[in-house]
Structures are given as structure tokens and as C-alpha cells.
Image (cartoon, rainbow, N blue to C red):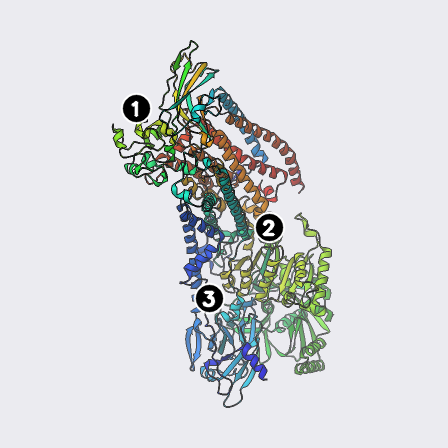
Amino acid sequence: MLLINRNLITLSRTVYIGHKEPPPGAEAYIPQRYPDNRIVSSKYTFWNFIPKNLFEQFRRIANFYFLVIFLVQLIIDTPTSPVTSGLPLFFVITVTAIKQGYEDWLRHKADCSINECPVDVVQQGKVVRTQSHKLRVGDIVVVREDETFPCDLILLSSSRHDGTCYVTTASLDGESSHKTYYAVPDTMAFRTEQEVDSLHATIECEQPQPDLYKFVGRINIYKDKEEPVARPLGAENMLLRGATLKNTQRIYGTVAVYTGMETKMALNYQSKSQKRSAVEKSMNAFLIVYLCILISKAVINTVLKYAWQWSPDRDEPWYNHRTENERQRHVVIRAFTDFLAFMVLFNYIIPVSMYVTVEMQKFLGSYFITWDEEMFDEELGEGAQVNTSDLNEELGQVEYVFTDKTGTLTENNMEFIECCVDGNVYIPHAICNGQILSAASSIDMIDSSPGGYRRDLFFRALCLCHTVQVKEEETVDGIKRGIHQGRPTSFYISSSPDEVALVEGMKRLGYTYLRLKDNYMEILNKDDEIERFELLHVLNFDSVRRRMSVIVRSSSGEYLLFCKGADSSIFPRVVSGKVEQVKARVEQNAVEGLRTLCVAYRRLTQSEYEEACHHLTEAKLALQDREQRLAQAYDIIERDFVLLGATAVEDRLQEKAADTIESLHKAGMKVWVLTGDKMETAAATCYASKLFRRSTQILELTKKRTEEQSLHDVLFELNRTVLRQHCRPIYNRLSVDCLDFGLIIDGATLSAILKPNQERAGTGNYREIFLEICRNCSAVLCCRMAPLQKAQIVKLIKASKEHPITLAIGDGANDVSMILEAHVGIGIMGKEGRQAARNSDYAIPKFKHLKKMLLVHGHYYYIRIAELVQYFFYKNVCFIFPQFLYQFFCGFSQQPLYDTAYLTLYNISFTSLPILLYSLVEQHVTMETLKRDPSLYRDIAKNSLLRWPVFLYWTCLGVFDAVIFFFGAYFLFDNTTFTSNGQMFGNWTFGTLVFTVLVFTVTLKLALDTHHWTWINHFVIWGSLLFYVIFSLLWGGIIWPFLNYQRMYYVFMQMLSSGPAWLSIILLITVSLLPDVIKKVLCRTMCPTATERAQV
Amino acid sequence: MMASSYNAKDEDGHITVSGPGGGGTLRGKKPENTAFKQQRLPAWQPILTAGTVLPAFFIIGLIFIPIGIGLYVTSNNIKEFEIDYTGVDMSSPCFNCSQNFSWNSTRPCTCTVPFYLEQPYESNVFMYYGLSNFYQNHRRYVKSRDDSQLNGNVDSLKEPSKECEPYAKHDGKPIAPCGAIANSMFNDTLELFYNDPNGTRVQIPLTNTGIAWWTDKHVKFRNPGGDSSNITASFQGTSKPVNWRKPVYELDTAADNNGFINEDFIVWMRTAALPTFRKLYRIINKTSSMVPTLPRGNYTLEVVYNYPVRSFEGRKRMILSTISWMGGKNPFLGIAYITVGSVCFFLGVVLLIIHHKCGNRSNSADISN
């Protein structure tokens, strides 16, 4: 006992309710320190913003690089001035800091609004209103209906007599049904603040942990001079932060146990980490390659320089002496300085403007998402939201889609569709009139007299066989609102939305369940008469039996057993009824994705009833194996049914959900559904949303199955099945015929698979086998998932050896962790609060918008940014490589080929706007084509436009063009006169000629790549060329007073006045563009991609 | 193919669902339906297919080949004569001068180089000097000048920019013009004589103006005192560049070609792009339409050999050239044009073949799909 106590102290916390000290002698009172109830999601504070932000920015390899270059320019004598790199760097850092600061400010504001929301606390027997963040562990909190719990609480008493309360945890785990929580028995009688305040008790419980469904603790209640009474506390006593109180006026005296960042909700949030897109990763890889190129260029040049100037007549010919200072410097220092000077000279190969352009492209480009009218939802009055613009292009790279079910795939709105009694189908049409329409379908009608009776019995059965509660209220904004003439508004509440839908459906068919009063269920039948049935027993639903029953006594004294359940569990127990017709209908409905239930009844004689009663009470009183004995009792009672009919309920899929999933499949994405919901429900949705097809072979990996076989065997067997049937990947898009697999796995099995186990290290890793199975399944359904498990799954796939790009989409707070974990997180602005949307990277109103988001926007962003990145590297190779070649002809003296103005402005203005515009508005294929043909998405899968061969092609093209520019100019310039008046040109004209060819070539190269010429494109492309010309005329047209050199004076004009210069420019541009054009045409003609086919 | 298509269309995915009483008030947030915001601006959507590129190739071929031929013919019609007078060989007339060079010698060394022109030069003839292995484009060299001093700025004249180091000051006095470029100005004197078949030696008149860019001479380069007559006074207190034999204000006798605006000086100050370069030295103007400017025959080049190039294995040349509308002799441009034109034409043919073969194939594939 002592030992256990000690363990409890170290591994648990003790909470003193109302901060009252325990009576002396119990245990030493050690006040523990707990965090306050503040939620912090922001990254910076006012004080650490500047250092932390600067640190994070310079952690970016590019920023750090530019900083180094800038410092080098400051320190040594370099060919270019430090302003050329310092100014852009300063600009970039400032803009980014402002952007990030603004975003963090928004987060602060959001946190504030949560932390400052009012909370009622009992203090000294009075209710005091305070702010959420001031709550402390041990406070007694009062929560009213529809309020959200401000922290994790233990229920002490409720306004309901039985000490229960109803709670919806929709925003936590996505289940919108009401769950019942229980007050501690000793305190449930408290009704007033004073009573609650008089309580003297402590709670011992475990330290915070993220599992939502687990809580272990005990409460010690001290009464006057008695030994404390200890009561166990479980998850059923624990109200979680984020859940909402429903259908209970108020609950009293709940005690805060976990607060602030220690609540289970907060623990289920994952820390925000910066998401990097695949494009950014390739960009960084390319950057490193270029950095290597740059360094090797500098090293080569330095080495060659010293080799070349070995002879002093080359080093210092009589016409070109060093200064005395330089001469005295040590040769190693000189060599190092030279190396740095070369670095500075070639540093433009990695332009700072690329990062600015990418940032601008992402920031501005994301506006097209928010502007998109098609993604605007009139009902919500909101369009798509972009929370991070860093991931736009990642939308075009998604391989795995992890979607929540409730509220994401479905409307979270059950609807009764039809029922079938003995083969007659009834469809409630309008809500109010209650008319019954017999479907004129192929089902043959049977004579009406027995049908009429059976039909009424069927409706009564559905009105009675359920656990729905009725809540009456005047005006509620609830979703389910039942209106009956002359009665106050009432609506149904149940832990199962299906039941609500069924009872409501019955109401529309004329039978209204009114209430349960004193164990009598009241029904208003279609003749407006009230029928009363005495409820004798409820045989609760469980997922093994998959049915539930009630035993009632009608007003005429008959004992009736009504049972409803899954077809598979009803049909074997049926002895009579129109089994064939009903079965046919049930199957048809199931195929349509409706959730079907069969209804049967059995008339019990008095003796049968008594026997059943006996069985049930015996089982209920059993102390051991109660569950098992109850099951046996149910099994005995539920038999010899007469089949009445079947119902069909639809958890309405969101509009176009199936179409969207089908498109995603066609686009080559694997769709996984992760839900906290039951397997049956989830599977039905999957069928309805075409995630599973009729042809899909379902593999089950559930607890039920692993209980029969060992996990090991199941896994290996499934793997064998999958591999045996595994059809080789077919590139043809029409491979749908090939047998595909769907996997269903539940949370318990998943955690068993993921559990690291040293014992079976030899038998191979389950994780790998599981991944192997998943890889061969076109669709996977994971049910009964805890929020963190969802994130685990995403993490598992992310870390698998192909490193696929994942996307998570969900609408509730339970999806937040997976939204944060996935490469791209998308929130649906759903009914279950805004947490998902807030924590997501993108928020959309409806699931169907995902299609346009990925297939159109994602595709566009990807090709845009891919071109942007490749083009940037290309144009800078073109820019810098001639300069490198020039070093061979100027004695490796770091002489720049181009004027400083050209060096600075090349990336900033001459060639920046066309590519920025391209990366904003390019549409290589029309939007309609992209939507029509989702398989085009496969063309860009796996970062295909930024792979190494493509990168190599662009670089080679750049080098080729650079060689053409330089040697073209070299041979044309070599030793000849260019003018018709015999005068000669100098080195600046040479550089300007190369530069002119360069600007025109790279701009025209982009023009050749542009497939979508709007007037803006024309304006910007021709405008920037014109700007170059005008700038050059101006730059060379005046003696600039503030400059200490006038080297460019009239150079450009002199060049233009010479005929051969024009001819050479035209020639060199043509030659430079030729290979790319040929490559494009040949590729298109010989082996066109799907995209290219779609372009024609 | 190159069809302009206007993308205005009705959208199938567009649904208008009115929420229960909510839509009206929130409609203000609805994004604007403008062509730009919906990415539906009318656009021309060209696609580079064999069909569209083919004509372009043929057109380029057809344009480039005649241009190339024209350029080539023009270039061939240009007469150019080049003679190396460095004096590396023992046999060379300038050998002695090149061997005995010293900076301090007061007596100029002269040498005479005879040559024969096989063709008469009809139009204006341009006389160049050429240097090889002379790195005028070395960074230390290129920046070693003070443009504001050359532009006549008096302050810069007194205090040359530190870029001119180590050629900024001499004996405490500022050097004018400062810098390595100016210091190393080419100072050989070249004179040309025509040896008449009857034995007389006729000196050919050489014009030393019009050899520099007009803008350089009139805007970029200015003497410190402006156009004041006393150019010597304006350079008072400055020192001549170390290697020069005479100060800058004694470069020429003519006032408009003296000091910083001396055209030989300006030409030299325009640094060459490559280590082997030529610079315009003099112009031989055509005097009468009847007689060729330089008739066929024997000539003598008289060189006052001042400029040492042997130390860095340089070469000195004298070039005589006529000029056409496209400048001096440059066969490369013409050949390049002809080559590119032919390649384009050839590619056009190849593409035509491929287009016919593959075009049919892909068409049939499309149909089968």
C-alpha cells in the first residue's frame, strides 16, 4: 500500500478542489505548480521577435550566403560595390520579417480571444466571472449549456437528476453525437454553489497525456472526521477542453485538473514546424549545386590566375604596376583575396532576387485561390482561404490524400431515404405532409391487407426501437429541428445520428415519437392518436451483435420484441417474412451507398417474456463475465424473428464528393479516409463516395480479426493476398478493371502495428509489411482513430521510403494534428468550429473544392514555380558564364564583363518582371482541360519538372547560350572594325553587346515558353525589352555627375549605330534560341506527354 | 494551332446554393467575377508544334542565307594589309630598336619597314596600329583612370582619384592624366611613304582627327580650363605621366587636338576588350576620284620606335584597311549567317519529314483512343 502511494505521488498530481487544504494528517501538503490556462500558438513575443526572426531567416542557406557575400564586399577590394548585394538583401529580410510579424500578430490575436473568453468560477460560495486564462488547477467551474469547456474538468454534479450530462466532442474527435458523462456519485446531489463550495476533497490523477479516451484517477472526499472516501475516476467523469455541453442546463462544480497547454486538446495539437515544399527542397539542392559550381569557378580562376602570372612580366607588366601596399601583402593573403573577389564577381549566379521573386510569386499567386469564385460557397458566404502561401506548388504534388470522414466527405447530416416493408418501398417526400408514396418500381405489390398491418407495425417498430431522447425547446439553432403543428419545437438527440434520422423519417411518414414518460413511450400515429407502449427492456446496441432490441408492452397487453440491426445479423434469425424481396432491396441500397438496417419483430407470450426477463436480470447481476453472459442472454432472446422490412439512411455525402474522389484517383492520388467513426458507418461512406467500388476487394485489418488470429498471421496473409493479385503497374489510364484492393484498419490494430517491439525484431518489421500492403491498395479506410493516430498514419506514410507528398483534409479539431503533420494541410470550414481551418495551410468551404484546388490551382502553381526556378538558374548561368569565360581573356583579373548598372539591374529589373508575371498567370493548358482530364496531374507528379535531368538540361542550355554569346561576340569582335567610320569599340561595348544578346535571348526564351499570352504578358515581355533599351540609352546618354566613372557614355548608342552589331545580335539570339525550339518540337512530335496532347 | 481563343465560358462546377437566409448578407465577401481574378483573361495560346515552327525555319533560312552571302561578298571586297614591325627576328628592320630600348634614352630610335601593296586601295584608307598580348582589359588597368579629371574637373586635376594609384602622383605633384592607361599610352610615330616607280618617295598625308568617337572628344574629354587659349597654364602644377616624353599639353600643336582632347590619347583611353586589339591611328582621305588613295606599289613605313612590347612578348602591327558599310574585313559574320541559315533550312526539311511521319501516327493514335 505504501509503495503504491509513493508511486502515485511521483506519477500523479494531486488536485485540491477549491484550493482547500486537506485535513491534517492525510498527506503532506505540497503545493504543486501548474501552468495557467493560457493557450499559446504564436511563435514570437514582442521582445524576441527581432533576434529570433533574424536568426531564423539567416538559417536559410540563401540569406546566409548573401550576408557572407555582402560582408566580403565590405571588407576586400572587389569588382563590384557592396551596395549591389547589400540593398537587395536588406529589402528581402525586411519584407519577410514584416510578413512573418504580421502573421504572428494575427495568431496572438486569436490566442487572446480564446484566453479572454469569460468563465464562471465558484469562489467562497459565489459564482464569479473571470477570464479563461486565469483558471487554475483546482478551480470549480460552472458551465452552461452550449458552452465549451475551458479546460479539462472532472464532473461533480449536473443539473440533471441522474448526475449525467451530455457532451458533444465534435471539435475534438469529430463525433457529433452526444456522449453521456457521469458525475461522481458522492457529489452528484449538489445543487447550489454553497454546496459545491463546502466540498472538501482531493483528486489524484495521472500526469497529462494526450489520449482522449483514457483517464485514470481517484477522488478522496473528506467528510467530518472520517476516513476519506475514495472513488475511482475514469474517462466517463472527465470533460475535455474543446467539447461542448449539450442538452444539460448547467453543470456545477466541475474541477479543473489539466489547464492550458496541458489539456488533452492542447496535447493533441502538434507543435508547429515550418513546412517546406518539395519545390523548395529541390531549389535548395540546386542552390547547393550552383554554390559548388560557383566555388569551383572561383577556385579554378584563382589557380589559373597564379599559374598564368607566374612570370613577373605577366603579373606586373611595365604598363600596369601594383600599388606599394598590394605588393607588400603576403601571397597567400593575396590569393585568398583573389578567391573572394572571384566569388563576388560570380555571386550573381545565385541571385537574391530569385528568393524575392519566389516569395512574391507565392504571396501574390495565392490571391488567385482566394479570388476564385468557384471555390466560394454561398451558403457559408466564404471562399477559400490561404493561411500559408509557401505551399502553393505542393498542391500540385500530392500523392496521398488523407481525409476525415464526418463533415469532410459527408455533410454530417443523416437523412432518411426510404424504407421497404415486405417489398413495398416508401419514400418520404416532403417534410410536412406525411404522404406515403409507393414506389412504382419493379417490386411487385402484394395484397394490401396484411401489408397494411405489417406496415404499421414496421413504423411502430422504428418509433420504438431506439434510444433517442426528445428535447423540447422554443427556439434553438440546432441542426435537427422537428416541427409539429401546435406543439413547441422539439428535436431528437441520440448518440447515433442514424437513429435520429430514422425517427425523423418516421415522423415524415406519419408516426411521430413524442417522448418517453415514466417508462411509457408515446407515439402519435398518422390518425393523430397517441399510442402508448410500456418500455420493458432495452437490449443495447453493440458492434459485435450489430443490432439492438426493445421489449415493449402495447396498450392491448401484447409483449413485442422489436429488433433492428445490420442485415447480416438479422437475416439468420428470421423465420418468416418476405426475406427475398427485402434482401434484394437491401443489397440494392447498399450498393448505392446507403446505410441499411433491417427491422424484425417477435411476439412474445407471457411465459416467453418472463423467461427473457429472467435471462436478462441474471446476466445483468452477474459479477463475473457480465459482458459475455449478457451476450448469451441476448442471443437467446433475439431469435425467431418475423422480418418486417428494411430502412435506408444516407449520411449525405457532400456535394460532388464522389466525383472529387474519383478525380483524385484518376489523378494518381491515393485517398485514405481516417475517421474516429465506426467501421460500418465509415465503410458505407467509402462505398458511397466511390472510394471503394463494387469490384474492390476489401481487406480487413481490424481488432475483431486480430483477436481470432495473431496480428502477425493476418498481416502476412494479407500481404500474400495483395502480392499474389498484384497487377503490375500499368501506364494505361484504363487500368481500373484490374482488381484493386481496399484496406480497412482500425485504431487498435494500427497502434499494435506501430508499437515498437523488440521481441520480434527477428521476425521482420510489421511497419514495413503494413506499408507494403497499403502501397498496393488503392484506398484505405482507417476507423476508430484518435487524433494523434491520424497524425501517426500521416507520419508513417511521409517517412516511407518513397517519401510521398501527403495532404490532410479535415474539418474538426481532431484533424488538426494530421493537418499539421501532412505536407499540405487543408481545413474545411465546417460546422465543427474553426480549429481545423485555423491550423490549416489552406481552408476551403467544401470537400469538392479540393478538386479545383489540386487539379487546377496546384497544377498551375507547380508548373509556374518549376519554370520560375529553372528559368532563374538558367538566366543566371547565361548571365555569369560569359563573365567566367572573359576571365580567360583578361588575365584572370576579375574584370567584370558588364557594367555595374547592368550587373545590378539584370536580375532586379531587366529580366525580373516577365518571369514573375509568367509565374503568376501562365496556363499551359486551359482550366477546363485540367478539370476534365485529371490524369494530367500525373504528368507533374514526383516533382517531375524539377528533377535532375531537367535541371541538367536547363543548365546545359544556359551554358550553351552563354558560350554562344561570348564566343559569338568574341569572333565578331576579334580584331575587326565594327563601324563604317573606322573607329574602334572598347571592352564596354563588347560587354554591352553580350549583355544585349543575353537580355533579349533570356526574355525571348521565356516568351517561347509562354503558352498563355494575355495583354499583360505582351505588355511585360515587350515592355521589359523596351525598358532595357531605354535604360541603356539613358544610362549612356548623360555624363552622370554622381558617378566617378563614365565608362558607359554613349557606348550603347555607338553600338546601335553600327550595322554589324545589329546583325550579330540577331544572329546570336537566333542561334541561342534554336536548340530549345528544336528540342521542344521534337519532344512534342516524337513522344508527347499527356499535357502536350491536351494542348493541341 | 496558333489559335486565339477567348476563354469566357460558363462553368459547370459553378453552383448557386442559397443558404437559409444567410446568403444575402454575406454576399459582400464574394470574390469579384473579373476576368483577371478568375484567371480568365482572353489569351493567345501559341504552341510550338512542328507545324508552326516549320515555316519559321524556312523563313529564317531564306532570309539568313542571302544576308550571309551579301556579308561575305562585302567582306571579301574589303582590302586589308597588315604588317608586324615588332622586330623580333634578327632580319627585321626594327630589331635593333626593339633590342636597344631603354626608357631613359633621349634619342628616338627609328626604323624603316618596306612593304608592297598588291592591290590599289580605292576609297578612304584607315590606318591602325595593333598590339598583341597587351592586357588593356586587366581590371587593375581598366579602372586606373579618373574620368572626372579627364572631363576637365579642376579638383580632380589637383587630387586624382585613388583608383589611379600607383600612377596618381609623381614627386608629390598630381599626374595629369593620371592612371595606368594614360601612363602607357602608345607613342610610336608611324609615317607612310609611297615609293614611286620613278624613284621618288612621296609622303602620304595622314589625318589625325576623326579617329575618336565624336562624343568622347566633345563631351567626355575636356581640358581643365575649358576652351581657354592657354592650355599650358591650365595644367600648371601637374606632372606628366612617368612614361611620357612630353606633357599632355604638348601632344599636338593644334589647340583643338591638344591636352585631354587629343584624339590619339582618347583612342588609347578607350580600353580594348581583348588582349589582341587594334586602334585607329590615322585616316588617309581619298583626294580625287581619279587616283586610288593608295595605288599598287612599294611603300615604306617609318617608325619612331618608342613603345616596348618585348618584355611581355607583345607584338606591334600596322594595318591598312578600307571600310564598307559593315565595317572592316570580317568574313566570320557572313559565314555564320550562311551556316545558321543553312542549318535552319536543313532542320526545316528534317522536321517536315518527322512531322509527316509522326503527325500521322499520333493522329491515328488519337482516333483509336
Identify the amino acid type marked 1: Thr
Q: Name the image quarter holding residue A739.
A: bottom right
Q: Do callouts 2 and 1 point to residues on the same chain?
A: no
Q: Indicate left or right for B22 with A545 as reference.
A: left
Q: Which residue is mark 3?
A: A40
- From the top left corner, tell me how far across and down residue B25 is, in percent: 44, 58
Q: Which residue is mark 2?
A: A942
Position of residue B165 relative to residue B285, above or below, is below
- Cβ atoms at labels 3 and 1 below 8 Å apart: no
Q: Which residue is mark 1?
A: B253
- From the top left corner, tell me how far across and down residue A475 is, in percent: 48, 70
Q: How many marks?
A: 3
Position of residue B166 relative to residue A193, above or below, is above
Closer-to-camera residue (A1009/A674):
A1009
Instruction: Inspect this view and state whether residue B295 appears.
Output: yes
For disc 2, the chain is A
Q: In 3D space, how far apart are the residues under numbered discs 3 and 2 (Cα atoms)?
A: 36 Å
Q: Do callouts 3 and 2 point to residues on the same chain?
A: yes
Closer-to-camera residue (A241/A189):
A241
Identify the amino acid type marked 2: Lys
